Amino acid sequence: MSRGYLRRKHHDLLATHGSTWTGSNRVSHQGRSVGRYDKLMMTTLSATDVLADVGHGANLGCVTEEGSVSAAEVKHELHTSPSQPVSFTSSPKEPRETLHMDPSDIKLDPSADTPAPEGQPVKRKKGPAPKMLGNEVCSVCGDKASGFHYNVLSCEGCKGFFRRSVIKGAQYVCKNSGRCEMDMYMRRKCQQCRLRKCREAGMLEQCVLSEEQIRLKKMKKQNEEETARSSAVSAPSPAADVLPLAPEQQEMIEKLVAMQKQCNKRSFIDRRKVTPWPQSQDPMNREVRQQRFAHFTELAIMSVQEIVDFAKQLPGFLELTREDQIALLKTSTIEIMLLETSRRYNPAIESITFLTPDFSYNKDDFAKAGLQIEFINPIFEFSKGMNDLHLDEAEYALLIAINIFSADRPNVQDHDLVEKLQQPYVDALHSYIRIKRPNDHLMFPRMLMKLVSLRTLSSVHSEQVFALRLQDKKLPPLLSEIWDVHE
C-alpha cells in the first residue's frame, strides 16, 4: 500500500465541524424581600450603623470576597458591538475519525520490499519522516515508538541509549558472544547487543550531535530569540493606529475610580468598629470561634455598604424601579465582594489584605472563621487568576459596573433598560484595553470570562451559606436578607 494512497485515505476521513457555546450560568434566588435591604437602598447608612445588626454570635456566610473557579481561557478574540449583547463563543472541533493500520503496511521506501542483507543497516529514503499513526513500535526493542530518531523509528529509551553510547564512545561486552535476542527485557541486560541492533536498524552516528555542538546550537537559538525580542520592541507599535478614548469615556472612567476610592475610604475610617480578631489560638474555645466569625461578618457588612453606595452613584441606576435595583444588587453583591477580594490578594504571602496589614488573612484564617475548604480554595484560586491579569483601578471599576448592570439576573423586569445602562461600560472597557494592551487581543474576552467564573463562585457561596446554617451559625439580618437565608 503506497504512501500516496494513505494520504488520500487520511484526508477523506477528516472533517471538522464548528460548534458554538454560549457562556451562561444560572444563579437561583428567591423573590424580592423588603426590610433591611430596602432601608439600605433608601438611605446611605454608615458602617457603624449597619454593624449594630451584628452580634458576637453572628456568622459570616460568604464573608470574604472571592473565590475562584478558573474558567477556561478564551482561545479567540471576542468581538462585541454596542448593538449586540455580550456573549462568549468557542468552536471546538468534532473528534476526528482515526485511520487504524498495521505498522507492516507502512513502507518507508519502495526498496523496502527487498529485505536488507543481514547485518547491514536499513537505509531510509531522505526527506521528512512519515506521519506517525500512534501504533508504531521501536525497530530496536519492540517498545512503543515515539518517532524517527537518528534515521530510525525508535522509542525514547533506545534513542537516549544510542546517543549516550556514541557521545561517550562506549565499548560494551556481551556475555553471550553477541547472540542476544533484543527485546524490551533484554535491552537492559546486554548493552553490546542493543548497540549492535541500533546500528543494524539504521541509526547513524553522524546524526548524533556532540555536547559542544548542542551548546553552540542552544547559544545560537538564544541569540536569535534575543534579536527577535529586540526587533519587536523597536518595531512601530500598533497603538499608533488605535483611537484614543472618547472624552465621555475618559470622564466616565475617572469618575468610577474616584467613586470607588471614596467608598473604600469610608470603610477605612470605620475599621476600628470591627470586632477585633482574637489572639487566642485555642481551637476548642467557643467564644474565640464566635469572635472570629463576628469579625468576618462585620467586614462583609462593610463591603455590602460599599457596593450599595457605589451602585447608587452609577448614572442611571436610580432610574430603575426599586424592585430592579434590589434584584440587581442582591445577586451581584457576593460577586463584587469576590472581585474586591481578588484585587487585595498578595501572591507573595498568599494572603488577602482588606483595609490595612492588620486585616490580612490566609487560608487558615478563613477556615478558623468557619468557612469550608470547598469555598476557601476557589476564593484563592480566583484571586490568583485575577492577580495574574495585572488589572488597574480603572479596569476593576469598569468590571464592577458591568457586573451590577447584568440584565439576566433573577426578578429583573426592565431588561432593555438594564442592558442599555450596561453597554457604555462594556464599550469603555473594550476601548481602554485596546489602548493599554494593543498587542493582547485576548485580554478583553479574558476579563469578561472572569465574570462568568463569578457566577460559578456565586453558586459555591450559596452552598457555603447553607453549610453555615447546618453548623447552627446565624448570619446578621442584613446578610441573611441579601443572600436569601430564611430561618
Image (cartoon, rainbow, N blue to C red):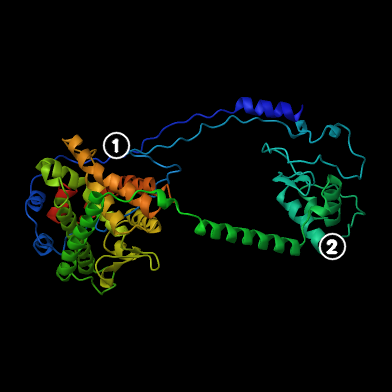
Regarding residue 464, the answer to whether it shows in the image is no
Taking the image as shown, residue 367 lies to the left or right of residue 127, namely left
Residue 149 horizontal/vertical position (percent): 75, 48
- The quadrant holding residue 365 is bottom left
Q: Which residue is mark 1?
A: 85
**Mark in the foreground, 2 or 1:** 1
Mark 1, Cα crowd under 10 Å, few <14 / some 14-19 / many 20+, is few
> Residue 214, relative to residue 323: is it above or below?
below
As rendered, which of 141 and 88 lies closer to the eye? Answer: 88
Residue 286 horizontal/vertical position (percent): 22, 66
- Marks 2 and 1, how far apart at CA: 68 Å
Q: Which residue is mark 2?
A: 169
Taking the image as shown, residue 465 lies to the left or right of residue 186, namely left
Taking the image as shown, residue 448 lies to the left or right of residue 276, namely right
User: Of callouts 2 and 1, which one flags the residue occurring earlier in the amino acid sequence?
Assistant: 1
- The quadrant holding residue 468 is bottom left
Mark 2, Cα crowd under 10 Å, few <14 / some 14-19 / many 20+, is few
Please state which amino acid type lies under the numbered disc 2: Gly
Label 2: which secondary element: loop
Regarding residue 117, the answer to whether it shows in the image is yes
Residue 363 horizontal/vertical position (percent): 34, 63
Residue at left 90%, top 50%? 179
As rendered, which of 190 and 437 lies closer to the eye? Answer: 437
Residue 68 horizontal/vertical position (percent): 35, 52
Residue at left 73%, top 28%? 4
- Asked if marks 2 and 1 touch (Cβ < 8 Å), the reply is no
Residue at left 63%, top 28%? 11
Taking the image as shown, residue 77 lies to the left or right of residue 137, namely left
Q: Residue furthest bottom?
A: 279
